[in-house]
Image (spheres, helix red, strand yellow):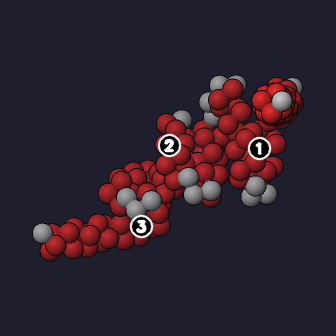
């Protein structure tokens, strides 16, 4: 008798688990169906609206939909994905998309500068220096990039001195 109750209990738990999974799958499919009905322009407008409201996580949903599911290649969208990820402290992902924006010629100086800032915040001054130098190549008058380049070089030099003194 106890064995039958136990088996019934296991079957009930499995049934609840399967139903729970299928409900979640259906919910995610319904979200995707809504997005599939939107044009690329509508997706971009929704993403831009959320971006302008500083709702970066939600904006990313629409921007990623455009580039991943619909294969849109747009420097502005890549730049905005870079910015959103930086705001969410995803510096590696942010830098990747800033560089993709530069590859398409979109706000090249700004994108290189922002990639440099990302690397500074990610504590990689050697890579930050490369991006700040690229930003200055694009815009030799960029005083912010010059300032950040100088600071990154100073930090890297100080780090090397400390490291050499420890050995």
Q: Is residue 137 visible?
A: no
Q: CA distance from mark 3 to mark 1?
A: 31 Å
Q: CA distance from mark 3 to mark 2?
A: 20 Å
Q: Is residue 89 visible?
A: yes
Decide: few, some or many residues near mark 1? Use Cα within 10 Å; few <14, some 14-19, many ≥20: many
Q: Secondary structure at mark 1?
A: helix
Q: Position of residue 75 (x, y in %)?
A: 60, 38
Q: Secondary structure at mark 2?
A: helix
Label 3 close to label 1 by CB (< 8 Å):
no
Q: Secondary structure at mark 3?
A: helix
Seen in the picture, residue 3 relative to 118 is either above or below; the reply is: above
Please name the residue shown 73% across and 41% down the image.
61
- Residue that carries the numbered disc 2 in the rendered image: 96
Q: Is residue 39 left or right of residue 114?
A: right
Residue 166: image quadrant is bottom left
- Residue that carries the numbered disc 3 in the rendered image: 148
Decide: few, some or many residues near mark 2? Use Cα within 10 Å; few <14, some 14-19, many ≥20: some
Q: Is residue 92 left or right of residue 18?
A: left
Please name the residue shown 40% across and 53% down the image.
131
Q: What count of labels does the image hold?
A: 3
Q: CA distance from mark 2 to mark 1?
A: 19 Å
Earlier residue among tags 3 and 2: 2
Earlier residue among tags 2 and 1: 1
> Closer to us: mark 3 or mark 1?
1
Q: Position of residue 107 (x, y in %)?
A: 56, 47
Decide: few, some or many residues near mark 3? Use Cα within 10 Å; few <14, some 14-19, many ≥20: many
Q: Position of residue 4 (x, y in %)?
A: 82, 27
- Residue that carries the numbered disc 1 in the rendered image: 47
Please name the residue shown 75% across and 48% down the image.
58
Q: Which of the two residues, 38 or 103, is positioned nearer the viewer here?
A: 38
Earlier residue among tags 3 and 1: 1
């Amino acid at each position: 008798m106890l064995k039958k109750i136990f088996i019934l209990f296991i079957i009930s738990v499995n049934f609840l688990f399967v139903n729970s999974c299928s409900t979640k799958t259906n919910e995610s499919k319904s979200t995707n169906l809504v997005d599939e009905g939107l044009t690329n322009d509508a997706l971009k407008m929704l993403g831009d609206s959320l971006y302008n409201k500083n709702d970066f996580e939600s904006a990313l949903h629409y921007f990623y939909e455009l580039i991943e599911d619909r294969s849109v290649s747009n420097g502005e969208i890549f730049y905005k994905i870079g910015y959103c990820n930086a705001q969410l402290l995803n510096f590696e992902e942010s830098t990747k998309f800033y560089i993709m924006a530069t590859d398409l010629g979109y706000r090249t100086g700004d994108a290189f500068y922002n990639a440099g800032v990302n690397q500074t915040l990610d504590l990689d001054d050697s890579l930050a220096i490369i991006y700040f130098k690229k930003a200055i190549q694009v815009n030799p008058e960029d005083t912010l990039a010059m300032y950040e380049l100088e600071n990154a070089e100073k930090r890297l030099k100080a780090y090397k001195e400390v490291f050499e003194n420890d050995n």
